[in-house]
Image (cartoon, rainbow, N blue to C red):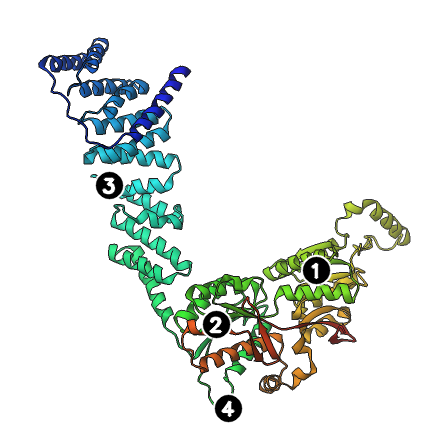
């Protein structure tokens, strides 16, 4: 049996090679059979029908061997093949279908022979060979509509089984277009559309739609999905072309409705009001104090509260620190408010969404976020912020060179900001030859840091220090005999094998963490943070526990001359409060946009071009450099807390 199978496989491969290599010349017309051969064929057929198979097969074999070949030869082969096929002897059936395919003479049964041979290969466990044969038959045989439909049904079933979903979708599309049964046509159409929506990669959709017959619904699905891919990739112009095809192909379909909706967005997005600047910031929730400060800086720059009315308008949207809300906000600012540019976001988790959508719509976005690699998103993205990379580089350098610190620990919130800064800090410490001895994360909404601190200093998992814990426990019982019944949870001394603790979080969180560190005897450790610590609330919340803390800030902000600037004086006069870094950066960003627009730029593409061409400009604090990554950069300084006052580390 194994030898027969191997020989059959070799026969299949050889045959497929011969068929694929043969030319496509028109086949010859066979000789007309004589009456004797015709009578013999009819007799053999009658014998097979009356269960006298051996005699019938014997006659048919003689007829296939006669020379010259005549028009009964193919009938004899086909009848024998069908007989073996009915008996599920697919090897012999295939061997008798094959001469009809390979013959140099034309046969009306050639198309059926291709189809039946492919079935034989499929049932014999050779789907790839079956698929190759049926594809050859579809290319070369003269198939009527019925055989062609059956061939595509077989083809689709094999392609689906072998996970060739692209080819299966093409076959299903043909059946949805050409099958005579309306019910089956609808079923094939649904299957094809399901694959188009859920399986076929966007890059293949264009090829799927080219030079192939589809039902209107399938064509609409292909064009819509590919158009949507282009739309999401930022190529709005090409997306428009494919959406137009959807509407013209199947105007009543759901895809046409979706395309029309995106059409509408594209049309709305193309409208620009050159004097309206969009702003998207966290104006409520945990980070509202930062967002509101930045908004005040923008309002001041645009002259919203000036004595003479400004021609500039501001369209403001509260991101609520939520990426999904931020995405809706960007769409609204562009399609409803028709802004010429967008200032924001501010947080890591929202800034990337804002940048992505702005870049897709080709609307200049100047972000105030410190998120790394933000401007890599596209040419329409700019940044005015003290980047995380610059801060961490300066912070670690200052800690190691000015303070002589070599060992560090990290306590960080598990949100985007905390995780990103923790990773950057760890990498920078290692790069400078330092060591991170411990790291512990906490939920960004955490208010009780007891557990996290105990894990950080090795007093949480008692089993890891069981012998040492037993010693301290026995001593405690001996000392408190007859008094207190349950021992305290701080019997073990903390393992403080680090000189500094990096906490990339707000002064509010630090105000809860710092006293808790003291409570658990974590002493003599320098607290390290980012520039969001540079605000009066750091001292107010941290009190004596933040003495000696180290962080970095924009050098210009720290200088005494800064408090004499026109910006500082106007801000304090207008809002009765001091501006912070974010207010200054937002002010400079808005002011820069007003200058570009007042100098005659009225289109988004021209605003982007002018921004990209700048290498420096004079801001509220002095000269600001713009690097080749479209980032506005200011020099930094190390700050510390001494006697409840923020001063320079120098």
Residue density around tag 2, few if under 14, some if 14–19, many if 20 or more, within 10 Å = many
Q: Earlier in the sequence, mark 3 or mark 2?
A: 3
Residue density around tag 4, few if under 14, some if 14–19, many if 20 or more, within 10 Å = few
Residue labelled with disc 1: 449
In space, the residues marked 4 and 1 are separated at their CA atoms by 49 Å
Q: Nearer the viewer, residue 480 or 415?
A: 415
Q: Earlier in the sequence, mark 2 or mark 4?
A: 4
Instruction: Name the residue at the bottom extreme.
Output: 307
Point out the frontmost of discs 2 and 4.
2
In space, the residues marked 3 and 4 are separated at their CA atoms by 73 Å
Mark 3 and 4 residues: CB-CB less than 8 Å, in contact?
A: no
Residue labelled with disc 2: 342
Hey, which quadrant is residue 99 in on the image? top left
Image spot of residue 40 (x, y percent): 14, 12
Residue labelled with disc 3: 183
Instruction: Name the residue at the left extreme.
Output: 35
Q: Nearer the viewer, residue 368 or 206?
A: 206
Image spot of residue 294 (x, y percent): 56, 75
Point out the frontmost of discs 4 and 1.
4
Residue labelled with disc 4: 307
Point out the frontmost of discs 1 and 2.
2
**Please, is residue 97 above or below residue 189 in the view?**
above
Q: Nearer the viewer, residue 243 or 523?
A: 243
Hey, which quadrant is residue 521 in on the image? bottom right
In space, the residues marked 2 and 4 are separated at their CA atoms by 25 Å
Residue plotted at (41% across, 58% down): 232
Residue density around tag 1, few if under 14, some if 14–19, many if 20 or more, within 10 Å = some
């Amino acid at each position: 049996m194994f030898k027969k199978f191997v020989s059959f496989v070799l026969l299949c491969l050889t045959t497929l090679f011969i068929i694929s290599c043969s030319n496509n010349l028109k086949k010859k017309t066979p000789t007309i059979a004589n009456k004797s051969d015709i009578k013999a064929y009819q007799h053999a057929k009658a014998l097979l029908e009356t269960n006298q198979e051996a005699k019938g097969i014997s006659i048919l074999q003689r007829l296939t061997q006669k020379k010259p070949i005549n028009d009964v030869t193919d009938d004899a082969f086909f009848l024998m093949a069908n007989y073996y096929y009915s008996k599920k002897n697919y090897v012999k059936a295939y061997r008798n279908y094959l001469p009809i395919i390979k013959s140099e003479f034309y046969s009306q049964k050639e198309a059926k022979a291709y189809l039946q041979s492919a079935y034989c290969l499929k049932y014999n466990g050779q789907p790839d060979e079956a698929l190759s044969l049926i594809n050859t038959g579809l290319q070369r045989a003269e198939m009527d509509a019925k055989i062609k439909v059956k061939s595509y049904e077989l083809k689709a079933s094999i392609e689906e089984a072998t996970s060739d979903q692209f080819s299966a979708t093409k076959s299903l599309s043909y059946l949805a277009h050409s099958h005579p049964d309306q019910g089956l046509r609808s079923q094939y159409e649904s299957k094809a559309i399901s694959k188009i929506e859920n399986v076929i990669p966007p890059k293949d959709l264009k090829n799927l739609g080219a030079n192939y017959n589809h039902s209107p619904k399938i064509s609409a699905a292909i064009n819509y999905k590919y158009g949507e891919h282009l739309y999401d990739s930022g190529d709005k112009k090409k997306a428009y072309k494919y959406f137009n095809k959807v509407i013209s192909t199947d105007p009543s379909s759901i895809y046409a409705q979706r395309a029309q909706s995106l059409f509408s967005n594209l049309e709305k997005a193309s409208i620009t009001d050159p004097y309206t600047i969009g702003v998207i910031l966290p104006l409520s929730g945990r980070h509202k104090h930062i967002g509101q400060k930045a908004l005040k800086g923008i309002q001041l720059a645009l002259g919203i509260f000036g004595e003479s009315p400004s021609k500039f308008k501001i369209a403001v949207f509260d991101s609520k620190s939520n990426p999904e809300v931020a995405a809706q906000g960007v769409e609204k600012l562009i399609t409803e408010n028709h802004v010429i540019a967008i200032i924001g976001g501010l947080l890591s988790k929202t800034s990337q969404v804002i940048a992505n959508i702005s870049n897709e719509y080709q609307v200049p976005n100047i972000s105030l976020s410190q998120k790394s690699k933000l401007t890599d998103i596209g040419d329409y993205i700019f940044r005015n912020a003290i980047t995380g990379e610059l801060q961490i580089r300066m912070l670690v350098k200052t800690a190691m060179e000015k303070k002589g610190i070599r060992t560090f620990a990290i306590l960080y919130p598990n949100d985007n900001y905390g995780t990103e800064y923790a990773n950057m800090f760890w990498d920078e410490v290692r790069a400078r030859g330092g060591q991170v001895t411990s790291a512990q994360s906490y939920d960004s909404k955490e208010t009780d840091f007891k557990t996290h601190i105990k894990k950080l200093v090795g007093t949480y998992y008692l089993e890891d220090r069981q012998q040492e814990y037993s010693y301290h426990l026995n001593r405690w019982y001996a000392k408190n005999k007859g008094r207190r019944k349950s021992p305290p949870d701080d019997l073990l001394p903390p393992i403080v094998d680090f000189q500094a603790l990096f906490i990339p979080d707000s002064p509010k969180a630090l105000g809860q963490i710092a006293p808790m560190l003291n409570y658990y005897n974590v002493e003599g450790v320098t607290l390290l943070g980012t520039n969001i610590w540079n605000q009066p609330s750091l001292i107010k919340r941290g009190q004596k526990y933040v003495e000696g803390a180290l962080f970095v800030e924009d050098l210009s902000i720290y200088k005494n001359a800064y408090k004499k600037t026109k910006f500082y004086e106007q801000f304090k006069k207008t809002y009765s409060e001091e501006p912070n870094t974010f207010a200054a950066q937002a002010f400079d960003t808005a002011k820069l946009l007003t200058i570009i627009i007042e100098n005659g730029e009225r289109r988004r593409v021209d605003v982007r071009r002018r921004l990209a061409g700048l290498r420096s400009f004079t801001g509220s604090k002095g000269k600001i450099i713009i690097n080749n990554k479209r980032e506005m950069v200011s020099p930094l300084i190390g700050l510390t807390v001494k006697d409840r006052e923020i001063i320079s580390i120098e």
